[in-house]
Image (cartoon, helix red, strand yellow):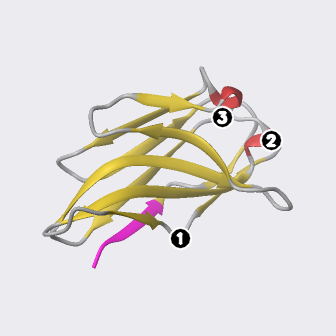
Amino acid sequence: QVQLVESGGGLVQPGGSLRLSCAASGSGFSINTMAWYRQAPGKQRELVAGINSGGSTTYTDSVKGRFTISRDNAKKTMYLQMNSLKPEDTANYYCNADILLRGTLQLYDYWGQGTQVTVSS
């Protein structure tokens, strides 16, 4: 069974930094695209950043130049380095991955449980 587990959230002052991690556990699978989403209270979930298996990245405009997404394929782990954090970055951050189960030709969409990021003085 495949699981995605996020960590690294917390409370930080404006201008501060946090590093989120998303580790995939289980066996018999490979990971295609991975992404970070976030959802603030009363708002829809939005894509923050994505990274494919080759390392190509994409970011939503509001985080460009401040956030960096990366992955370690050997560790099956994705990271989100968040710098110059703003109060509007406050949200629950979710890890997402498109996973190919061994023996199948279909990608399955997996989500983590979320980790809270709060930016406040």
Q: Amino acid at mark 1?
A: Gln
Q: Amino acid at mark 2?
A: Glu
Q: Looking at the picture, how far across and down is residue 2, in whole percent?
A: 30, 73
Decide if residue 44 is on the left or right side of residue 72.
right
Instruction: Determine the residue positioned at 56% across, 58% down.
Output: 94
Residue assigned mark 1 = 113
Q: Write the start and end of the magenta stretch as one range.
A: 1-6
First along the sequence among labels 3 and 1: 3
Q: Which mark is residue 16?
A: 3
Compute the Cα span from label 3 to label 1.
24 Å
First along the sequence among labels 2 and 3: 3
Q: Is residue 102 magenta?
A: no
Q: Is residue 3 magenta?
A: yes
Number of on-image labels: 3
Residue assigned mark 2 = 88
Residue at the right extreme, as displayed: 42
Location of residue 9 by image quarter: bottom right
Element marked by disc 1: loop
